Image (tube, helix red, strand yellow):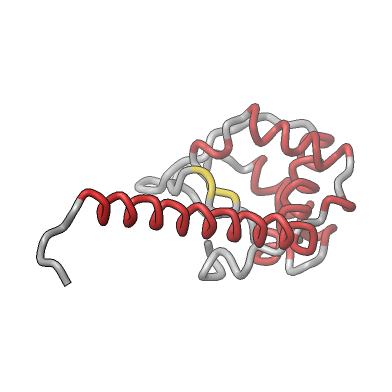
Amino acid sequence: MSERFTKGMARNIYYGGGMFFMLLFIGLTVDTVTAIPERENRDQLTASVAHGKELWETNNCAGCHSLMGEGAYFAPELVNVFNRRGLDNEAAFRAYFGAWMSAMPTNVPGRRQMPQFNLSEEELDAMSDFLIWSSRIDTNDWPPNKEG
């Protein structure tokens, strides 16, 4: 074997490596696209859930909270808040969520404060529906701990 690294060798490594990683990228993309239908819950999407998502965006909830790891980490992850606080009971979660939102801000010294959004009962139900719907997406065990 020659002790020189030639232009031809460099070219072959460049093109071979590029082709390898392109094929790897395509393979991972196909794997992801085929896994999505079994992990989502698009069939449970309702107008109320869509309205809750709209409220999530309008009130910039992702500015403090994260949902499925997307958003800020200032406040708790909310993808599993239905399981944590509602204990898989929709009526109990709606009551909890409504009470929590109406109690904000708590004005406890030394604690981060959530603003008061003055949401109507319909809007609270829509946000609850959105969080319940989000909790039913297969997130592959995200977040890693129960409290987000």
In this rendering, position of residue 110 left or right of residue 85: left
Q: Residue at x 65, y 58 (%)?
A: 32
Residue furthest to the front: 2
Q: Is residue 145 above or below residue 12?
A: below
Q: How many marks?
A: 0
Rendering coords of residue 46 (x, y %): 89, 43
Quarter holding residue 96? bottom right
Question: x and y percent of residue 9 in the render?
Answer: 26, 56
Residue 138: x and y, percent?
71, 64
- Which residue is the extreme one toward the left? 3
127 to the left or right of 148? right
The quarter in which the N terminus is drawn is: bottom left
Question: Residue placed at 64% from the left, 32% from the top?
Answer: 57
Q: As rendered, which of 99 and 61 lies closer to the eye?
A: 61
Residue placed most toward the observer, 45 or 60: 45
Q: Position of residue 93 (x, y in %)?
A: 76, 57
Q: Residue at x 89, y 52 (%)?
A: 43
**Residue that appears at 55% across and 39% down:** 62
Q: Is residue 81 left or right of residue 148?
A: right
